[in-house]
Image (tube, helix red, strand yellow):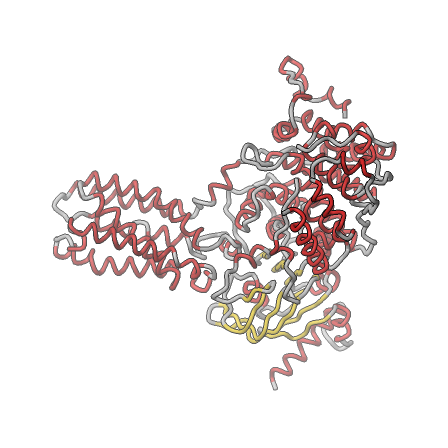
Amino acid sequence: MTRHPSPAVIARYADREAELDEVTLWAVEVHLEDCAQCRALVAGSATDDTRALLARVTAGLDDGIAAGPAPARVRRWAVARHRWLVWQLGPWITMTVAVLGCAVLLQAVAPDMPSLVALLAPIAPLPAVAVAWSRRHDPAWELIAGTPAAGLAMLLRRTAAILAVVIPALALASSRTGFSLALTLLPCLAFTAATIALGSFIGVRRAATLLGSAWALAVVVPTVVTADLSPVLQPGSSPLWALLTLTLAGFAATQARGYRLLSSHN
Amino acid sequence: MSHRRENRSNEAFVLLGVRRSLEATDEQELVRRTAAGERRAFDELYRRTSPWLLARLRRRCADDDLVADVMQETYLAVWRAASSFGGPGATGSAVGWLWTIAAHRLVDAFRRRSRQSLVPAALLAETVAPAAEDVVLAGRVGQELEQALLELPPDARRVLQAMVLDGFSVRETSLLLGVPENTVKSKARRARISLRAALS
Amino acid sequence: MMRTVSAAETAPTTYPWAVHAEELRVRAGRHLAVDGLDLTLGTGVHGLLGPNGAGKTTLMRALATVVKPAGGKLTLLGESVDGRADLRRVRRGLGYLPQAFGFYPRFTVREFVEYMAWLKEMPKNAVPGAVQRAIDRVGLTAKAGARMKTLSGGMLRRAGIAQAIVNDPAVLLLDEPTVGLDPEQRLDFRELLRDLGVDSCVLVSTHLVEDVAVACTDVVLINEGRLVYQGTPEDLVAQGGQGDAGDSPSERGYSALLRAHRAEAAR
């Protein structure tokens, strides 16, 4: 806090007619923002017309308060929550978790089937991620698309919210069915990163569909047909998956530009 | 405002013994309690800050009617929006926040006026040379800064006051002072350069 | 409390027009809705008129950077809008009210405007004051705590306008803002428009010719994705004659210009 100006200066400040040079004015105003004591002095130095003006304001204020709404209770978390988790994701995440639950149950019923959880893990978050960045599913899309915050960072936040549910679910499912945790989580992360990376070129929905179909054709179908777990999911492949995840994640992080003018793909 | 004390239901509650002395609380606390709907806290906040705000606004606008409108709108906004003012995470003081609201309402009022082709109430500018003792007693700002401010042409000082002290943007300053945006920018640029030279 | 003024803020304005489009082409689906449009907009309220299917909404969407232009040049606030540009700076100075917008249903009006303020990357301290100011300016003060779901069409529109103006944008794009407003609300809205036009560039798309004639400083008429006419409302009136369709001089001017443009296109 600065040193207090003299009461005489404050009195001159309070009176508009009194002359006060600009430099002193500046100093006084800077000081008054911090000092309640000197503000009280300003109150004490009120001239008659100032008092009349204040009385007018007071009366108008009383009317306004009586007429208008009372202070609103603000739900501080309501807005903050929407930065991460948006409503339209709810059903899709629930569906994903339910499907994983069914996979666990099926595995319990038929234990010698190749691990369903492992087969589903990579594509588990994809539907939700596709919906997280889709004009059709996001009711506020038209409003969001033109804002500065729209872009890769927002997609990543929403994806993080999705993964925050899907990863623990997967971990639980894989521990229940006794399949390797790394081989469940790493492909999931790799495919999510791939969707985001590819999505900057062709759109997230198309990327998710493409990757999901590719996985289904290349891995799920042969595994179901031959009843033999695909080599891609054999125990030794986890380092490769880790490397793939890191590479794809790094690449996705550089694709911010592709997400700036998003609507061309949505 | 004191006559309101009788008819509030929460007054009875307060009088029952939870009577905390409002004199001891600072403005930030008063805003917080206003947000909770406490009319007494709001009245106290008003009592403490309105003379200062009035004086400050009157030094920016010659039109007392406009100033009265801005004051009213400001405090009504405080009453309604107090709950969204920061909290523990808020930077800046409650008083600074109050000024920001008032400044924006002033801009809106000027927009209304200029649309109605009324001559916008000019910002007052005193270009009086400071008396020696005033400069010394004025407090911090600093000798070099004061010197540099004195050396600036008065219109550059006005621009600087609007932008630095009051926090207006270039667009708002141009509206309030009635000068084109590019003029505001060039004056601010020159002022910055000479001030930076003085302060470094 | 003194704020610092940055060099960027005081750098001279390099661009003469807030919005400048040259040979702009924008697709809506497969169809080229904006086809070779030249447009220059400065400070003031510009009314965008045109028949249905003229490309008004697509043009607005392109200006709001919601849709990437298919061709031509578009410059907003001095920045060129194309695939390469960093649009964050431009978008911070934009406000957009779409013709049809959705919202997260659980929001109250204040939360909705606050969410949009956050999306526009406004400084955190400024948000509560700016939200209240926007709500007050559109006249929704009494309804600030009401859920968006419970609002009538006109009030919803006003909430949309509030989110568009919350960041005090230099370029404001309003697509059919008066839909659902009753006559008194429309009058209030015209006042608001005029206030906004004092120091920013406002583009209002509407099919109510009267709204444009009264509140706008400038009229832009487009048809089939091209610019037909740009001038003052008085000049628009001057274009019309007794033989043209319409109940008011402005409407007659509008019909006359459209007729002439269609005749020109048919040739």
Q: Residue furthest top?
A: B17
Relative vertical location of residue B106 with respect to residue A148 in this rendering, above or below = above
Kindly tell me whether residue C239 is visible in this rendering: yes
Question: Residue C2: which quarter of the image?
Answer: top right
**Residue A38, image x, y percentages:** 74, 29
Would residue C11 appear left or right of A172 to someone viewing this image?
right
> Residue at the location (79% across, 33% down)?
A10
Which image quadrant: the N terminus of chain C? top right
Would residue B125 appear left or right of A159 to someone viewing this image?
right
**Residue C121, image x, y percentages:** 54, 49
Which image quadrant: the C terminus of chain C? bottom right
Question: Residue C146: which quarter of the image?
Answer: top right
Kindly tell me whether residue A63 is visible in this rendering: no
> Residue at the location (51% across, 42% down)?
A79
Q: Residue furthest bottom?
A: C267
**Residue C13, image x, y percentages:** 65, 62
> Residue at the location (80% across, 55% down)?
B116
> Residue at the location (80% across, 33% down)?
A9
Q: Nearer the viewer, residue C218 or A201?
A: A201
**Residue C208, image x, y percentages:** 68, 63
Q: Nearer the viewer, residue C52 or C128?
A: C128
Relative vertical location of residue C131 with respect to residue C49 in this rendering, above or below = above
